[in-house]
Amino acid sequence: MGTSGTLSSTLFGRTRGAVLAILFGHVGESYYLRQLARVTGIALGPVQRELRQLVDAGLVTKKTLGTQALYSANEASPIFDEMRSLVAKTVGIHDVLQAALHPVESKIQLAFVYGTVARSRESQQSDVDLMIVGGVHFANVVDRIANAQKTLNREINPTVYTVNEFKSKMRGNFLKTVLGEKKLFIIGDENVLEELGHQSMA
Amino acid sequence: MSLKNWAINRWLEKLESDREEIERLLANADGHLDDYRKAVASEMSTDAQLSLAYDAIRASATAALRATGYRVVRGGGEHYRTIEALEFSIDPERKLIPKLDALRRKRNTGAYDDYGLVSQGEADLAGKLAAQVRKDVEDWIRKNHADKIT
């Protein structure tokens, strides 16, 4: 899964990706132009140009409040669900978490998001449930994801298992449920998960 | 931010405390720490271990806050604020608070939603931090509110 950076820049480009990540990462919330420029760290002009195109394309709605415009993801767009999923897997939660975990990546065999966010059924306040399997410590992960929480404006709940613990807990109710649900892989993929599953049966 | 600002925000309210209350809270933390150690020795579930260690952390954090003469306003995320308020006592640089808060959320998830999710490493960290917070809080009270501890 080392290709998401290329994927996101190929699909969206920097400014569009940053704007979509905020708007589709916080569906139901509205942002002023200046607010978007501040949060993304991109100048007003480029952000304004992107917003104009996204509004014209029907992906973003614009509401005028007094003298200012408020922008939000257009939930009535016919490709809203697909966009939200694509954004989450590229410039949204996926990229932010991958960047946060990058310094400890060599110690991690598998990391994925599960729960409401992975199912794209999250509310504005939904936490991000993050499963990590490997030799990294929980305290280290908490330190690593501190900035990601601020960027995503969501609390991230990590669970960190060693490989052996993960394998043994695969038979328990909690992991059985999690593994049966939709997942958003951050490090590793379905093949790594299957391999761990086979090893736990051996 | 300061304790006064928190009170202005109506997250805290002023309420005098005394030695008896503070020592009762520290004894509460000790009780939970003892139970945590018994849970480890008898190989109880990691969820139970983390929950007991967390209860010790919360009791110690409450002792630190009460020693200042404030308490969390009811109905305002009492556990969250109590942990966050350690910034005004033992953890001004917030090195511990993010970890303690992550353990708080994990304890809640284990207690109400997903039993069985706590890993051994997480339970061990909770136990280690519970002992550290208990000690740091007592040291801090002795230094800053000596009249409230024997």
Image: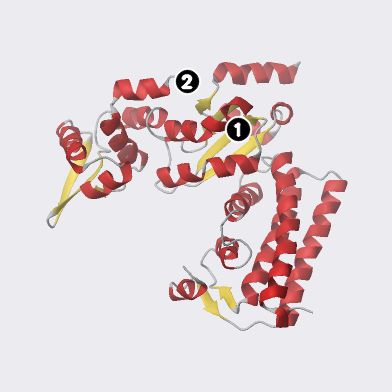
Q: Residue at x 44, y 35 (%)?
A: A96
Q: Residue at x 59, y 39 (%)?
A: A141
* In this rendering, the label closer to the viewer, 1 or 2: 2
Residue that mark 2 sits on: A2
Q: Is residue B97 left or right of residue A51?
A: right
Mark toward the start of the polypeptide (1 vs 2): 2
The residue closer to the viewer here, B58 or A150, is A150
Residue B80's quadrant in the figure? Answer: bottom right
Q: Position of residue A151 (x, y in %)?
A: 41, 43
Q: Position of residue B73 (x, y in %)?
A: 53, 73
**Above or below for B20 versus A18:** below
- Name the quadrant of the C terminus of chain A: top right
Neighbour class for label 1 at 10 Å: few (<14), some, many (≥20)? many
The chain ID associated with circle 2 is A
**Above or below for B34 versus B24:** above
Q: Residue at x 67, y 20 (%)?
A: A197
Q: Position of residue A52 (x, y in %)?
A: 15, 36
Residue that mark 1 sits on: A132
Question: How far apart are the two marked residues, 1 and 2, measured between alpha carbons?
Answer: 17 Å
**Above or below for A16 versus A23:** above
